[in-house]
Image (tube, coloured by chain):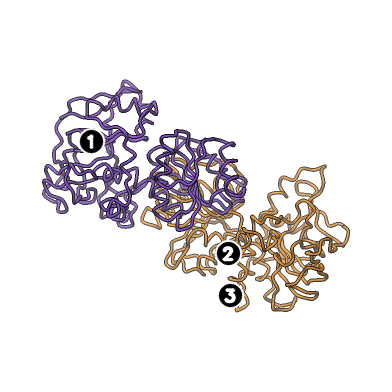
Chain colours: A purple, B orange
Amino acid sequence: MRATLLYGVGDVRIEEVPDSRVVEPTDAVVRVTAACICGSDLWPYGSHPAGGAPARMGHEFVGVVDEIGAEVTSVRKGDLVVAPWVFSDGICEYCREGLTTSCTHGGMWGFGDAEGAQAEAIRVPYADGTLVKLPVAADSALVPSLLTLSDVFGTGHHAAVRGGVAPGSSVTVIGDGAVGLLAVLAARRLGAERIVLMGRHRSRTDLGREFGATDVVAARGDEGVAAVRELTAGHGTSVVIEAVGTRAAYDQAVGAVRNGGTISRVGVPQYEEAPVGLGSLFFRNVRLTGGAAPTRAYMADLLPDVLAGTVNPGRVFDVSTDLAGVPAGYRRMADRESLKVLVRPA
Amino acid sequence: MRATLLYGVGDVRIEEVPDSRVVEPTDAVVRVTAACICGSDLWPYGSHPAGGAPARMGHEFVGVVDEIGAEVTSVRKGDLVVAPWVFSDGICEYCREGLTTSCTHGGMWGFGDAEGAQAEAIRVPYADGTLVKLPVAADSALVPSLLTLSDVFGTGHHAAVRGGVAPGSSVTVIGDGAVGLLAVLAARRLGAERIVLMGRHRSRTDLGREFGATDVVAARGDEGVAAVRELTAGHGTSVVIEAVGTRAAYDQAVGAVRNGGTISRVGVPQYEEAPVGLGSLFFRNVRLTGGAAPTRAYMADLLPDVLAGTVNPGRVFDVSTDLAGVPAGYRRMADRESLKVLVRPA
């Protein structure tokens, strides 16, 4: 079968790999019918060391179950399923609490011996804990939106939930990538009244407005912070969702949050240390929250709205391609020509 | 009148200063009957540059109202009152939300033209927003406990509240100073089931046990973290209260907190940057919260329990002195000979 491999910076190749197969009795094999390229794939795309082992890429997918191990009970051959961006056993202490990203047996697609989703098929460990059956056909028009439950919509939702967004909240969202835009949608869905979207790509911020942003701030840094404060009587918003992951975005979040408010991060931090002291967070009683989103735990909550069409997160996909088009898709996303690329391997 | 002045590192003097008087119509003058030395006073005590202006010290007090300005309505001459460690107008947006530390007109005792509480008297700005009347006499045995509402008990309570302590919670408290011990008491009061106190001063941790600590860990650093994890099936506790303020204590908090849990800081951070990235907080979905405690806002909640004697936070005072004994009191606290020094200026 064919799969996507990252060999080095900017070096994405589609190559033949061994067919996926059931190894453990808790495994399933899924034929991938829809996958995608994630903004977070661009971090290794821009940094993967050449010369070492190539990485299997892709951590978001919808597909049809092709084979199940002897102990799998929740899905069967032929089912259409969606998987979260991390697999998890579904039964450990953390999974039962909904923190599937901390699953005792969990792992990330493409790491260790886990396969990647930008491929014709994928072996799914802990299929019962990982996969969620979808009550539609593989060619349903809802598939792009259902695919966002893997990561980007669930991650935007996590940002809003951890930020404490509730009816009437005022929220700033930093970043107009897919996660930022879906954080806008998630915040709106949870009742946020004012949503300031910070982003400079007009086509994206226009979609952000359709998702519920009430204001758009194109400026960055101190100028951007000043603009948010001007919109909020000088105070900033009670919630700031940081959906980029750079130190500059963190600093912007600290500047834009109201005293007593919450910064909720879902952009993968590209820094380890950051200001948390007296002036930045402490005296102002600013909370820092968010993190890797346990999207599997949110599927039951978000799925009905996606199926009912009351939200349409799949609108973040602006390009669709087959597997052969994946390397070009990475280039387009890295160059900010595409917002998010849908991949149809089969 | 006499007041406490800090002239430089370790250089505390009791000197004559101009008598406190009403300046603004919203002021009151309070004759201080009970004040104290705070662990946080030890930071300037160890760092105040010599040669500049001396600092007026003390930010915790109980006293008798001696004079009020024309616009003061909530207290009158002769009332026994307690004040929080910051003054606040009581009517701004932040005060109405209970974040009195962010009051638009607020300030800290001893900064700018604000006087200090380790003195015979003190001018209180915004007396209506700042002071709370106490229904006991100035010589009541409850005064030491009532005095802790100024700062240390209210701050311990803030740590527990922000940490989300609820019935059944598991909590680690880092630090066996007055705030750490009263965070134990506050966590117990809010129903915490397991409270691990990290501290190495036996007499203090013994008091911590009386306040509700179920376990004591004397080890620090990696060894201390390992001990907490051993007590909690390897996971750490859902809440960690950091009541010291050093980077080492922060790192210990990161190590002792359970994935998905909360670090609540009330030790004044002596660092600006700290690890908040992928491995420390982000992937583990650890929240960072806490901050400067709006103790004025907690008085209504805590006062009945103190008056009823169901909690006895005043037990943190192990030494009592008059004003002349204040310099020695600083030395005793800096040398860890005293836990907390009560000052009776009048």
What is the three-letter code of the residue carrying label 1? Glu
**Which residue is pictured at 19% across the width and 38% down the height?**
A33
Query: Which residue in the protein does label 1 denote?
Result: A115
* Residue found at x 22% / y 38%: A34
Q: Is residue B201 above or below residue B269?
A: below
Horizontally, residue B269 falls left or right of residue B72, namely left
Q: Nearer the viewer, residue A156 or B81?
A: A156
**Subunit of mark 2?**
B
- What residue appears at the point 77 percent right and 59 percent down from the top-left corner? B326
Q: Secondary structure at mark 2?
A: helix
Q: Quadrant of residue A335?
A: top left
Cα gap from disc 1 to disc 2, whole angstroms: 51 Å
Gap between marks 3 and 2 measured at Cα: 14 Å
Residue that label 2 marks = B182
Q: Give yes or no for contact between labels 3 and 2 (Cβ–Cβ under 8 Å).
A: no
Q: Amino acid at mark 2?
A: Leu
Reply above or below: A147 against A99. above
User: B86 and B320: which one is in front?
Assistant: B86
Asked if the residue at tag 1 contacts the one at tag 3, i.e. Cβ–Cβ closer than 8 Å, the answer is: no
Q: Nearer the viewer, mark 1 or mark 2?
A: 1
Chain letter of mark 3 equals: B
Question: Which label number is shown at residue A208?
Answer: none
The kind of secondary structure element at disc 3 is helix
